[in-house]
Amino acid sequence: MKRRHFLKTAATIGTGLVILPSGTRIGKAAPSNKLNVALIGVWGRGLAHYDSLAEENVVALCDVNEKRFPDALKRFPNAKTYVDWRKCLDQKGLDAVVCCTADHTHAFIANWSLNRNLHCYMEKPLAISVEEARVVRANWLKKKGKLATQVGMQRHQFPNFNRLREMIHDGVIGELSAAYAWGDRQIRRSGYPPAEGQPPEGFHYDLWIGPSPFHPYNPSYFSGGPGMNCLSWNMYWDFGTGQIGDMGSHTMDLVWNVIDATLPTSAEAKGEPFNPEVTPVTCEFHFENPANDWRGPMRVSWYQGGVFPSSPKEYIDLKKIGHGAMFKGSKGFVICDFVSRIVLPFGDNADLTYYKPRPKDKILPDIGHFQKQWLDACKNPSLKTACDFEYSGNMIEQLLLGLVAYRVGRKIEYDGAAGRVTNCPEANDLLRRKYRPGWTLDG
Ligand SMILES: NC(=O)c1ccc[n+]([C@@H]2O[C@H](COP(=O)([O-])OP(=O)(O)OC[C@H]3O[C@@H](n4cnc5c(N)ncnc54)[C@H](O)[C@@H]3O)[C@@H](O)[C@H]2O)c1
């Protein structure tokens, strides 16, 4: 049986025929256990995936900048190269896609991958409009258990994520009523930069623009170092979402992993005046998330660009935590960053007698290496990944709805099942983006 057919058969029947996770391989990387992977966006964040892909067959490399190919080919010499991801995804025999392109193409590449039955690892943010998040999630839910997905929120592998979940579920702060996450990165731009110079030879600028409205070339979009260049374009509405999608994806994950939320019933935002070209730097967003089977309804908030939630006590300066989160319950607060946490029991009854730390054999297991968790799930899609397109799709849909509330300047009520704002018709127009002709979101 051809290996690809074998993979598909295994995925289709769901049980029985599975490829062993690589940790249980017999011998080192037996050829039949390797995935045929396309890496789209090979420089910048793409470089962070080279090591975890080293044991697979990287058979396709795609980048809009041809200058990036020689180095990538040194590492993956058997790969074919492409400048257009649509052609890359048509390569025969692919199993999986790792995508590190600019944010405005993420939902496209996620959908096209899923529609071609390819496992997909997508860098954060998964989408830049509410509609994009919903379409990707819907496509993934049709194939859940057959394809493996993961969004690049790799800090999720830090044990602190599990420790927070355990202590809040086990009642260290009583009944959970609110959660806050924040990020203090501030990069100000006044508008799209003017036309300047020409794209260097081998750089396919029109493909970089892709589905977004055209803006003339300016070298400042491409002036950042590897893995940091996203900070040169992600604040412009047509290319990204600013910090809410950037560090918001990582930092709200601290909250999302604890609260078991789906979609909010409302969103509101308060921040600096609206700029039609650039996303806000200073802004706060508030959401109401309905009750679930272990907690009541709660308020969830994201603060960015110099605003923070109020500290429960003056002697705790939340501003000293550049990216952090806080949980509020009936008996106190938990305050954390990605790797540490403090518990602040609050009030005369907060004596902690109601809280018993878990014994060692009951603590949640580490998820291990985040990228590898996805690679293992590609080989056995019945394995769960921490940040699949359902979990991450819900989270980014909520955050992106916050940007819609910011744009209309009022509290919006949301029907998450229908994907409609029920009290503000103009907000519904902002749930989706308009694309250039020739680009199909769900192709
Ligand atoms: N998970 C993390 O911690 C983390 C860290 C940094 C960046 N990122 C994410 O990774 C993505 C890339 O960020 P970056 O700073 O590397 O950006 P970048 O501008 O350097 O782009 C990375 C590579 O993708 C290529 N590329 C861009 N658009 C493309 C397209 N349409 N088709 C093919 N190739 C394309 C670029 O030429 C470049 O080689 C962003 O979405 C960013 O949010 C995630």
Image (cartoon, rainbow, N blue to C red):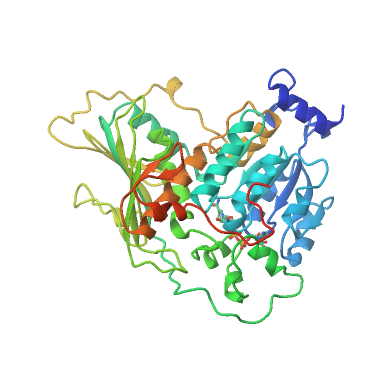
Residue 258: give x, y in percent of width and height: 40, 35
Does 415 sit above or below residue 189? above
Number of disc labels: 0
The answer to whether 232 appears left or right of 190 in the picture is right
x, y percent for residue 120: 65, 42
Q: Position of residue 21 (x, y in %)?
A: 69, 29
Can see residue 5? Answer: yes
Q: Quadrant of the N terminus?
A: top right
Q: Is 262 located above or below residue 81 in the figure?
A: above
Picture quadrant where residue 224 is located: bottom right
Image quadrant of ligand 1 equals bottom right
Corner quadrant of residue 225: bottom right
Residue that extends furthest to the right in the rendered view of this protein: 1
Q: Nearer the viewer, residue 150 or 55?
A: 150
Which residue in the rendered view is the most extreme toward the left?
A: 348
In screen coordinates, is 330 left or right of 408? left
Residue at image point 79% right, 47% down: 90
Report the residue at 37% width, 62% height from top: 305
Q: Residue at x 53, y 46 (%)?
A: 133
